Amino acid sequence: MSIGGRHCLSKIFQPITIISKKSNLTRQDVTSKSQRLMLDLGFIQQASPGCFHFLPLGLKSLNKLIKIVDDEMFKICGQKVLFPGLTNDKLWKNSGRLNEPVAELFQVKDRHHQNYILSPTHEEAATDLLSSVSPISYKYFPLRLYQISSKFRDEMKPRFGLMRGREFVMKDMYTFDVDVESAKKTYEEVCESYNRVFDRIGIEYVKVLGSSGTMGGTMSHEYQFKASIGEDRILCCRNCNYSANIELCGEHNCPNCGEGSNINLQTGIEVGHTFFLGDKYSKPLGAVCSSTNCKSEVLQMGSYGLGLSRILAAAVEVLSSETEMKWPDALAPYNVIILPPKKGSKEEPQTKNVAETLYTKLEEVIPSLRGNVLLDDRTSLTIGRRFLDAKRTGYHHIVIINKKTTETPSFYELNDTAMNRQLILSEEELIDYIKQNTVF
Amino acid sequence: MSIGGRHCLSKIFQPITIISKKSNLTRQDVTSKSQRLMLDLGFIQQASPGCFHFLPLGLKSLNKLIKIVDDEMFKICGQKVLFPGLTNDKLWKNSGRLNEPVAELFQVKDRHHQNYILSPTHEEAATDLLSSVSPISYKYFPLRLYQISSKFRDEMKPRFGLMRGREFVMKDMYTFDVDVESAKKTYEEVCESYNRVFDRIGIEYVKVLGSSGTMGGTMSHEYQFKASIGEDRILCCRNCNYSANIELCGEHNCPNCGEGSNINLQTGIEVGHTFFLGDKYSKPLGAVCSSTNCKSEVLQMGSYGLGLSRILAAAVEVLSSETEMKWPDALAPYNVIILPPKKGSKEEPQTKNVAETLYTKLEEVIPSLRGNVLLDDRTSLTIGRRFLDAKRTGYHHIVIINKKTTETPSFYELNDTAMNRQLILSEEELIDYIKQNTVF
């Protein structure tokens, strides 16, 4: 990836796939635009149905999303932990979630015939952790633990690539409070933090009432990106702003407005989900605190999920055209790509090291750009070909070094693909423009 | 974790466990010093045998190690990816590794009765990825892919905590080259990069010849920390510097010196392993490149592992006393801890915000310290009690704000626990001392 400490495209493993019998899937397996683009442009590769390799560019985007989440979690005292992927099934029996067989669960036996769940979510694991050190003094609450890790779900029909996989990257958080009132405050704070995460991602979203499903609890909200491919149907009432997943309220029903409802139905991709759990897990698993008067009180819980790999795919799905991948700038693997002239061109000898110098200067003047500038050093290809590649991959700022750069005064060509705008700028103007228009 | 953007100890979930019937394990389950210290001091908690929760401080140490590894991988053009944890067992059948039953493998069936392996290592997955886009032009090599993820192994007897777990965090790298000569060069470069990783960690290590075992291939080296608890036995010949795992050479045998051998036997903890694989995986799985003359050539591979969670435990094991955990500074969860006076003490009103101001200044003057300074704001406890906690947790620099800080000129008490040294320093001297003596 690096030449002299710089990110160089020639060194990035980005297999531009022609989907064929050689690859692990056929055109029929490709069920969404984002999946096709991410496969074709070498962001991911399918390993088996619903299981994908994150290739370097795909992982870089994922890590940018993780950074945003970590950042917002820190602001609300979220503490990062890592739970094992394997959860003893006794805990799920104790919580009641294994009372009926669950087809979506991957289960595995160890050599001593003990059964484990390949966890799709960690309510039991987190609660058992608290229980193992209970009772905990009231002083330590609210307690907000989260992790980012691979989760497993044996989907009947995995589809849409990262959107509905059998192995996926999720951020899951578990909160513990001493009473219902504090737990509701926590719930509000986490929701506000999720709003900030989605604001920073920059894709339009709605927060709607959701169904608690098998998770249990008394209140739940979903974060949804609006997209025609979405598998969820959302009802919004134009009269009163009530909005909910129709699983909860039916297709025709705004509980506030009744007859006077003015209903809009849309499809969405669920990208986040929050649950107010109360004592559904803490009571059977015994997670308690000692209150001010030394009495034991059952902890009140919340559970909060962000489908990180799904958010990547959903963002690409919402923004892209059929032929060009588009990213929100905050999640693009790189924010700036620099194209030096073709090897053997008239400009080449006159622009030696110009690209490298600009690269260094951008990172120096804009520290947040560190690691986010890419040099397209594949100079055996024409500028035109490399420009098309850069545009098709969704980089927002494409800087071209050409004839104008060799003149005095010297200029760069900047293509702002988000604004669909071409600008001729001096170095100072260029750096300033990128500084103003990059989202981190 | 944060108050006003600062890392505050009162907000960190660090359950100081008294191992009891309430917790998930008994004294008999605790088989090493590092395991006991990491459990007692709230760095990890056992979820089930050989599976551990990383609590906030444990995960912070792990992330510091990951940063060192990422940094060194970038220098040798290592590209970070993420493979699925589930590997289709067909690939393992094709590589020959399932020819005999492997008791250590966790295996799981999906709802369509397809068998998957919970991967302990990803030679097959990585090779299949390359194969799915083969033949690849020779221009793209050497190719060095690595990931950091949870791995699974159904150990008969998990023990020593993170040292021999059933679920553990490993960095694994797979390299691909066009011919044997380039592959050997890659092997050397990765080994040098591993040397740098271990140099930065700062624990004494040896690199010895290893056995290729079930992995296959023609050459292998192990990185070992010397420790009495280690399960590997290493032979070193004082005459010729030959060193190897005795699995490879037997107890009495230095192949170079024969009769003249001057043998030293030691025990070690294996913390890294490198394998020169040749075409053992690439040939059956069909990973090939197209060479300069458009002929297809089977790729030459290497595989390289660092047991990250094991390195943490091994470092603690090597450095700690029975009662005090010690970290190499590069892996300590925080490098500096600041202790403001006790609530209600004479010094308290005179030192308002002194700790916070010092915290901010340290991070400003020493940017690498950002996120690595901790404020022990548990001011209901005495300085003495908090000092003992800090010492027992292994922080290298403990800064105490006391009477001397309220005087003019003003001084801080710095306890350098690594050097076992107490110093009285002005603010400028303090910052300079920490700058000179912190390892990142």
Image (cartoon, coloured by chain):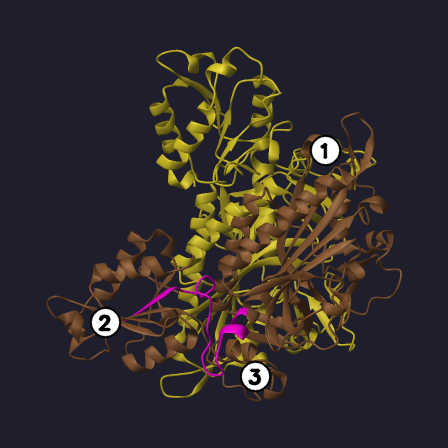
Chain colours: A brown, B yellow
- Residue denoted by label 2: A401
Q: Amino acid at mark 3?
A: Ser
Residue at coordinates 23% horizontally, 71% vertically from top-left? A401
Of A235 and A210, nearer the camera is A235
Q: Is residue B352 left or right of residue A205?
A: left
* Marks 3 and 2, the one that precedes in the sequence: 3
Residue occupied by mark 1: B17
Dot label at residue B399: none
Total numbered labels: 3
Q: Residue furthest left?
A: A408
Q: Chain of mark 2?
A: A
- Give me the C-alpha separation between circle 2 and circle 1: 61 Å
What residue sits right under mark 3 in the picture? A23
Mark 3 vs mark 2, foreground winner is: 2
Asked whether the residues under marks 2 and 1 belong to the same chain, the reply is no
In the rendered image, residue B369 lying in the magenta stretch gets the answer no
The residue sitting at 43% across, 64% down in the picture is A329
How many neighbours does mark 2 have within 10 angstroms: few (below 14), some (14-19), or many (20 or more)?
many
Q: Are marks 3 and 1 in contact (CB under 8 Å)?
A: no
From mark 3 to mark 1, how far is it between C-alphas?
A: 51 Å
Please tell me in which quadrant of the rendered image residue A257 appears: bottom right
Secondary element under disc 3, as helix, strand or loop, is loop
Identity, as a three-letter code, of the amino acid under mark 1 = Thr
**Picture quarter with the C terminus of chain A:** bottom left
Q: Which element is circle 2 on?
A: loop
Asked if the stretch drawn in magenta spans residue A332, the answer is yes
**What stretch of residues is rendered in magenta?**
A315-339
